[in-house]
Image: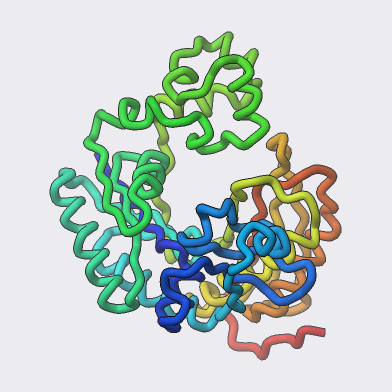
């Protein structure tokens, strides 16, 4: 049995700002742009008790906390910290699958829990020494449970789930903690009296289909602690690279999504440059509140690893997609990757 580790830097953008400016430590803080339509990219832990969260319009965040500090994004600092963290993860684990600048799954191989927890402690120590940032880690036999465990440990936690105890560990957690359960699906299940993960796990095939349709069995398997997805090495035979974000609350307008895809474009550009790759294709993936997935992509005249080009192409695709409903997930993907030494194209 392989053991999987999920690592997630705590309130990453906000933590970098607080690390570099002592005056920002211990105060409610968000990272956001300066435009009238700006949205919160990250909220510090001090801001979250006010109900402030990522993807919230900045004017709403200010209304909830009049003393809120607003800091502009510093993507060069985020990229530098991310590179250092991923180097540490690759040093301590067998396979690393990056999900974003601040989050990754790692395959530890066939080891016992005690060994896995020791690896987790070393990673936490090395990350703090190299970046002065805290990272939360979850360890389990599969991806979903490892992710839930790291969330349970935030901030700065290390939580391990013994093999064979996955179903029991998640059983009493709110149904909304399960991957794939958004606000509307949660409301539908709550209306049927299903509020805890164990209640979904107990449903029959017929009950599951009647409640959730064709995605029901997949969700029920997850509710039973069953997740067969493996950790794939993002350096091995790379065909595409993507970055996705699932929002705590559905986002209603394209304008609110644009700052998010800008951050994702910056991240993808860095990952391309790290691997010596450029992309001919840029696309967006939009998952709506009803789980419908809408996607659009476009081709570039020449391959690029420039964040401005990726962002412009992704914004173009997003406007073409014109999401007809509220959005629960947005992702940017680059594909048709090549190793090239030709000059990059300009933005226009």
Residue 69: percent from the left, percent from the top? 58, 73
Q: Going 45% across and 81% down the picture, which residue do you hit?
A: 23
Q: Point out the image quarter for the N terminus.
A: top left
Picture quadrant where residue 32 is located: bottom right
Front in this rendered view, residue 258 or 22 = 22
User: At which x and y percent is residue 246?
Assistant: 60, 50
- Give 274 or 248, whichever is nearer the viewer: 248
Residue 96 location, quadrant? bottom left
Q: Is residue 260 left or right of residue 51?
A: right
Picture residue at 73% right of the left edge, 86% below the top: 345
Q: Residue at x 51, y 23 (%)?
A: 195
Q: Is residue 50 left or right of residue 184?
A: left
Question: Residue 155 appears in which quarter of the rendering?
Answer: bottom left
Asked whether 232 or 91 is in front, the reply is 91
Q: How many marks?
A: 0
The x, y position of residue 57, in whole percent, is 71, 60
The residue at 60%/74% (across/down) is: 70
Residue 282 in view in this figure: no
The residue lying furthest to the front in this view is 66
The quarter in which the C terminus is drawn is: bottom right
Q: Is residue 58 above or below residue 130?
A: above
């Amino acid at each position: 049995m392989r053991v999987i580790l999920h690592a997630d830097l705590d309130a990453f953008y906000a933590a970098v700002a607080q690390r570099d400016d002592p005056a920002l430590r211990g105060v409610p803080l968000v990272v956001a742009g300066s435009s009238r339509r700006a949205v919160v990219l990250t909220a510090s832990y001090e801001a979250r008790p006010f109900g402030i969260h990522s993807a919230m319009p900045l004017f709403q965040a200010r209304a909830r906390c009049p003393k809120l500090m607003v800091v502009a994004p510093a993507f060069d600092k985020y990229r530098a910290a991310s590179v250092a963290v991923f180097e540490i993860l690759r040093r301590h684990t067998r396979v690393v699958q990056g999900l974003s600048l601040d989050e990754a799954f790692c395959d530890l191989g066939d080891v016992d829990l005690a060994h896995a927890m020791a690896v987790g402690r070393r990673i936490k120590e090395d990350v703090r020494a190299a970046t002065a940032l805290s990272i939360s880690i979850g360890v389990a036999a599969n991806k979903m449970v490892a992710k839930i465990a790291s969330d349970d440990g935030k901030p700065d936690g290390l939580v391990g789930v013994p093999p064979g105890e996955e179903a029991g560990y998640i059983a009493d957690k709110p149904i909304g903690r399960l991957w794939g359960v958004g606000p509307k699906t949660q409301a539908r299940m709550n209306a049927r009296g299903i509020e805890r993960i164990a209640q979904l796990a107990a449903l029959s095939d017929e009950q599951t289909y009647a409640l959730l349709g064709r995605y029901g069995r997949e969700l029920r398997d997850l509710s039973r602690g069953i997740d067969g997805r493996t950790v794939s090495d993002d350096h091995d035979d790379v065909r595409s690279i993507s970055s996705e974000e699932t929002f705590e609350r559905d986002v209603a307008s394209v304008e609110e999504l644009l700052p998010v895809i800008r951050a994702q474009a910056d991240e993808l550009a860095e990952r391309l440059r790290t691997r010596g790759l450029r992309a001919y294709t840029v696309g967006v993936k939009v998952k709506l509140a009803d789980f419908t997935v809408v996607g659009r992509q476009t081709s570039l005249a020449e391959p690029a690893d420039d964040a401005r080009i990726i962002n412009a192409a992704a914004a173009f695709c997003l406007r073409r997609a014109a999401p007809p409903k509220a959005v629960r997930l947005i992702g940017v993907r680059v594909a048709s990757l090549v190793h090239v030494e030709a000059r990059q194209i300009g933005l226009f």
